[in-house]
Image (cartoon, helix red, strand yellow):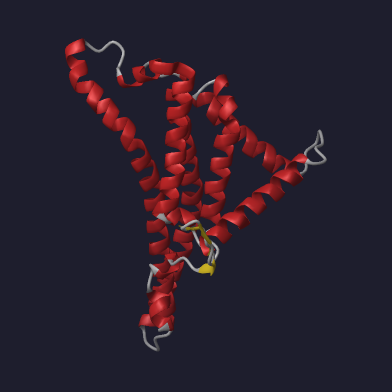
Amino acid sequence: MFGQMAIDPMHQFQIDEYFNIDLGGFDISFTSASLAFVVVLAVIFLILTMAASKAKIVPSRIQSVGELGYEFIANTVRDTIGEDGMKFFPFVFTLFLLIFGINMLGMIPYFETPTAQIVVTVALALLVFLTVIIYGLIRNGIGFLKLFVPSGAPWPLLILLIPLEIISFFVRPVTLSLRLFGNILAGHIVLKLFISFTVALLGLASVLSVVSVATFGLALAFTALEFLVAFLQAYIFTVLTCVYLNDAFHPSH
């Protein structure tokens, strides 16, 4: 049974329940995914607290990390939305750190990767989607609907373009959630397969055990790639969040 679990690439996504909690019919049990969120939030809080406390003109290493992260996301917000978009900087910065932290934690053996669970990525995507709609309506009122009317297009063409714009807008949470979920899930499956093949080949007392050297090298290379993907997927989610928020600030095309 252990061997079957070791080679099963989907077993790593099984969520374990630690404490069963039922609140008015809602299951809010504390699971391995919950633990991953708690660990990531605790690490983020600790790093940012250390970076912000005892700030110096000549920054320490931890302060430099905090300042670089701040400027990196702040510049992304300014470049995508403009200076007005900085009011959403805490929201965007938190999203980036949370997704990046979870992706990186998932690279550590025996830790859950919540971003490989579709329910988590859908929740994050819906949070962004609803934030855009609510703020867009608050800021622009009925003018937010200009988002669905491409400026400069001849009115006969609008009959075709407006439905397409509406469909494109409401598909956003689907594509946003599936992109993050699919990349993290696929990467972890492939990495687990490479590692399982390496372990299986090492156990063979034959010439096939030599092949394990190649699979081990591929596993190392793919691990490095997965660390890059962990960052890129967090950044892509952040950039798309800024792009969608930009529509709430500037609904006219």
Q: In which quadrant is the N terminus drawn?
A: bottom left
Along the line of sight, which residue is nearer the eye, 143 or 231? 143
Please indicate whether residue 75 sits to the left or right of residue 161 in the image: right
Q: In which quadrant is the C terminus drawn?
A: top left
Along the line of sight, which residue is nearer the eye, 40 or 212? 40
Which residue appears at 48% of the width and 31% of the height? 242
Give the farthest residue toward the left. Answer: 156
Give the farthest residue toward the front. Answer: 24
Along the line of sight, which residue is nearer the eye, 25 or 145? 25
Q: Is residue 176 above or below residue 164?
A: below
Please indicate whether residue 21 sits to the left or right of residue 253 in the image: right
User: Residue 209: which quarter of the image?
Assistant: bottom left
Where's residue 57, x and y in %?
A: 81, 33
Which residue appears at 80% of the width and 36% of the height? 58
Q: Is residue 94 above or below residue 207?
A: above
Where's residue 170, x and y in %?
A: 32, 34
Please indicate whether residue 161 sits to the left or right of residue 245 in the image: left
Where's residue 185, x and y in %?
A: 40, 57
Q: Is residue 236 above or below residue 192?
A: above
Which residue appears at 58% of the width and 41% of the height? 94
Which residue appears at 46% of the width and 28% of the height? 134
- The answer to whether residue 61 shows anywhere in this view is no
- The answer to whether residue 205 shows anywhere in this view is yes
Where's residue 153, x and y in %?
A: 25, 13
Give the farthest residue toward the bottom. Answer: 205
Q: Is residue 79 above or below residue 1?
A: above
Number of marks present in the image shown: 0
Please indicate whether residue 18 sits to the left or right of residue 14 in the image: right
